[in-house]
Amino acid sequence: MRLCASVFVCWLASISAASAGQEIPDYPMRQVSEHVYVIHGPTEIPTPENRGFMNNPAFVITDQSVVVVDPGSSAYIGAMVLRQIRKITDKPVSHVFVSHIHGDHWLGSHAIKQAYPQVKIYAHPQMITEAKGGGAQVWLDFLSRLTNGATDGTQAEIPTEVLQDGQVITVGELTFRVYLSEHAHTKTDAMIEVVEDSLMFLGDIGVYQRMGRMDDGTFRGNIAALDRALALKFKHYVPGHGPAGGSEAGDAFRQYLKTVYDAAVKYSEEGLAPYEIKAKLMPRMDQYRKWPLFEEEFGRQVSLAVLEAEQAAF
């Protein structure tokens, strides 16, 4: 254990020296269950000010090691996650779970791999395929552009461990159960249950008090995935963005998606255009209007829902 701690300290010193001006300040961590801690990130899009930090990195402390879920969008965010872990334990990080292809959730694995070369990084098989097929570089470039280079120096540590739906992975005394979707938020989504804590990591299948992106997703698939997760009635749900909580942390976005999609089906059958459907829906959006990114996403998502409804009709 002392050797692991020594290696970590040396690595942290080296990355800090190499990334002058790019370090991420320590964000507060919150213990949400007996073994699980969440660092709730900003809810806006990546900017130079937040240096690309926008998701909810989390870590699970077992009696043998630490499991990290979605370590963020850069090596510097990953290093911040490791610093927060060190405030609680000196156990090594043995596993990383990646919820989906969007780089704001997983590119921080670079820091984890540098500090712990033997770490196992898990993801949906389609996530691995897309990352290897150019998706990793697309996200590296995208985040660099949005942050004016604040994420530069990050390398894509593409997961090598392939997840399967229903798979059970035991780490120490804790059990992790895997739930894969064919097409929900993306075609690469994995939700992870911590069995002993009655807790589910939703990834971006579930977001809370913040709009979710649907450009790569399907309303019906996302709703079905949330139905599956909420039917299990866990005590804790950790969304990909926004505060962790009980079932409300998943159900609020489910209700939003269902409201938009059901309206898209109904009103498109009546011949209304997307802008007309948006106008009809707006009075029912009061609880969502204050969510970050509502103004940017709502109109586009109505159009996406209409397109999906029309395709489903054939």
Image: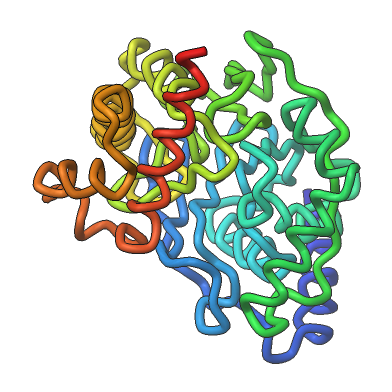
Please state if 114 lies on the left or on the right of 85 as rendered: right
Name the residue: 31% across, 15% down.
233
Task: Give the x, y percent position of residue 172.
Answer: 66, 24
**Which residue is depicted at the point 67% across and 84% down?**
148
The image quarter containing residue 159 is top right
Q: How is the model colour-coded? A: rainbow
In the image, residue 57 above or below residue 69: below
Residue at 48% from the left image edge and 48% from the top image edge? 213
- x%, y% of residue 155? 85, 62
* Vertical relation: 175 (above or below) 306: above
Q: Nearer the viewer, residue 210 or 178?
A: 210
Q: Give the image location of residue 250, x and y in percent.
A: 33, 32
Q: Which image quadrant for residue 10? A: bottom right
Res. 65 visible in picture: yes
Tell me if I can see residue 120 in this picture. Answer: no
Q: Is residue 159 above or below residue 192?
A: below
Residue lying at the far bottom of the rendered structure = 21
Residue at image x 33%, y 44%?
Answer: 274
Say left or right for 164 vs 178: right
Could you tell whether 117 is left or right of 199 in the image? right
Q: Nearer the viewer, residue 134 or 179?
A: 134
Q: How many marks?
A: 0
Residue 266 lies, in percent from the top left, at 25, 23
